[in-house]
Image (cartoon, rainbow, N blue to C red):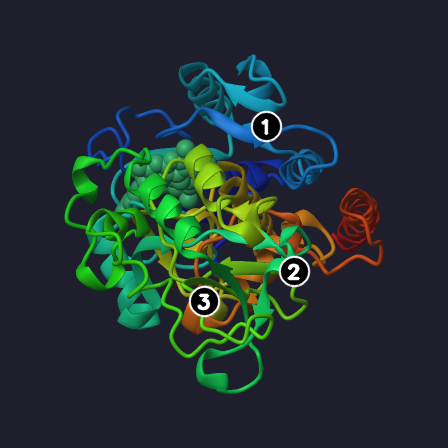
Amino acid sequence: MKARVTVVGGGLAGVEAAWQCARLAVPVELYEMRPAKLTPAHKTGALAELVCSNSFKSAEEGTAPALLKEEMRCLGSLTLEAAASSRVPAGGALAVDRGRFAEAVTAALEAEDVVDLTRAEVKELPLPPSVVATGPLTSVPLAEELAAALGHENLFFFDALAPIVSAESIDRDKTFEASRYDKGEGAYINCPLAADEYRAFVRALAAAATAPLRDFERGLFFEGCLPLEELARRGEDALRFGPMKPVGLVDPRTGARPYAVVQLRAEDVGGTMFGVVGFQTRLKRPEQRRIFRMIPALARAEFLRYGAAHRNTYICSPLALEATTEMRSKPGVFVAGQLTGVEGYMESAATGMVAGLNAARLCRGEAAVFPPPETAVGALLRYVTTAPPATFAPMNVNFGLFPPPAARSRRKRHAEVVARARRAFAAWLAKVGEGS
Ligand SMILES: Cc1cc2nc3c(=O)[nH]c(=O)nc-3n(C[C@H](O)[C@H](O)[C@H](O)COP(=O)(O)OP(=O)(O)OC[C@H]3O[C@@H](n4cnc5c(N)ncnc54)[C@H](O)[C@@H]3O)c2cc1C
């Protein structure tokens, strides 16, 4: 094993991976293809360029994104250090001045003696110990190498995500459990709509604001995977013959087939999160909140993940990765960032920290580690490495990923998850420190 780590990709995940190595005084070669070769979304040569929003989501105590940041700070996050010096006012969120943020990250890494930054595209999988963190817009030659190593069916090029709501926010008085034609157990929670409710919903959907499509995303959608709002625009009944079809379902409370139905399917074994079946959408988030809450059973829905549809390269991590982020088929090669199937700047950065830490530990002859699932980082890693492979889709950090708490009220449940995570993370960190 060589005594230096190769990190490919100088985005959110790659810079954290390199920084972890530097913190352990392990030499790193960091490869970034920009500015000579840009992705379709990046515009500069700066490391950790933010391609869209300048927000790192909530910083408010008691939320899942804030808990993730807290753990990242304990691990010595470079992106959060840079965010602190480039923060702009954003209420309860942590938002940054993009330019200053990227400059601060770039300067910190350039100042590190053990970090050797090379501006070049990497076209082959690096030798171990290494971290691949080339992101949602991984360049084609490397994506092909990944596909060859993992099997072409295990590398995906775009997301079409349906929203996920928390179980406790569904109004169960307005639902019934059943599978179509009573096949198997009542596997779905069905949310019926009367004719007037359905028509109002379709009208709102057809008129709703969608996220802008970027040039490289045009032509992304095909008939089998049209966003919900596109279907709604094709005619009033299109959804009733598509994802909202009521056939094979009888509402036991009325003894009749509903006019239209929205089906919810469990996303986890504990039944804490439910996906809205067939609701892949490009609606803006406030529009998703407003319009999906028109469904009577979802009037007070808490959205754990919003729907989205965009270009995104990611691997089938449940088949490909260990919880340490190491590739099963390539020992010593770790994968990080959006490529692993996490969604979002901070989630990507967090996996970069684990991948970098483990690549550095490998150089030092130490065993790979990962935080327990009670922690925010551990819950994310558990999701991406154990979710059912057939329906695996990218995920942001949220309370539905954690082992279910005992408390009953939502506020107390969240507080219990946070307190348990803090204890588990501190114990894990102490153990990792002792072992090294
Ligand atoms: C259009 C778009 C908009 C997005 N908007 C948001 C948003 O608003 N909020 C949010 O949280 N997330 C957003 N995301 C997701 C976002 O990309 C991730 O959250 C985050 O940037 C992922 O971090 P990463 O390190 O995995 O990838 P990136 O940050 O993209 O970093 C990957 C790096 O690898 C480099 N690279 C690629 N291939 C090679 C190669 N072969 N050799 C060398 N270098 C290479 C790239 O140039 C890039 O610098 C968006 C993604 C896209 C595509």
Could you say whether the residue bearing mark 3 is in a helix, strand or loop? loop
How many numbered callouts?
3
Separation of residues labelled 1 and 3 (CA atoms) = 50 Å
Q: Residues within 10 Å of mark 1 (few under 14, many from 20)?
A: many
Compared to residue 61, the image places residue 389 above or below, namely below
Mark toward the start of the polypeptide (2 vs 1): 1
Residue 258, label in figure: 3
Q: Residues within 10 Å of mark 2 (few under 14, many from 20)?
A: some
| Location of mark 2 (residue) | 172
- Under mark 1, the amino acid is Leu
Q: Does residue 302 appear in the picture of this structure?
A: yes
Give ligand 1's quarter of the image: top left
Instruction: Look at label 2 and name its amino acid.
Output: Arg
**Disc 3 marks which amino acid?**
Pro
Q: Which residue is mark 1?
A: 80
Any mark on residue 151, and which?
Answer: none
For the residues labelled 2 and 3, say whether their Cβ atoms are less than 8 Å apart: no
Identify the element where label 1 is drawn: helix
User: Residue at image x 80%, y 54%?
Assistant: 431
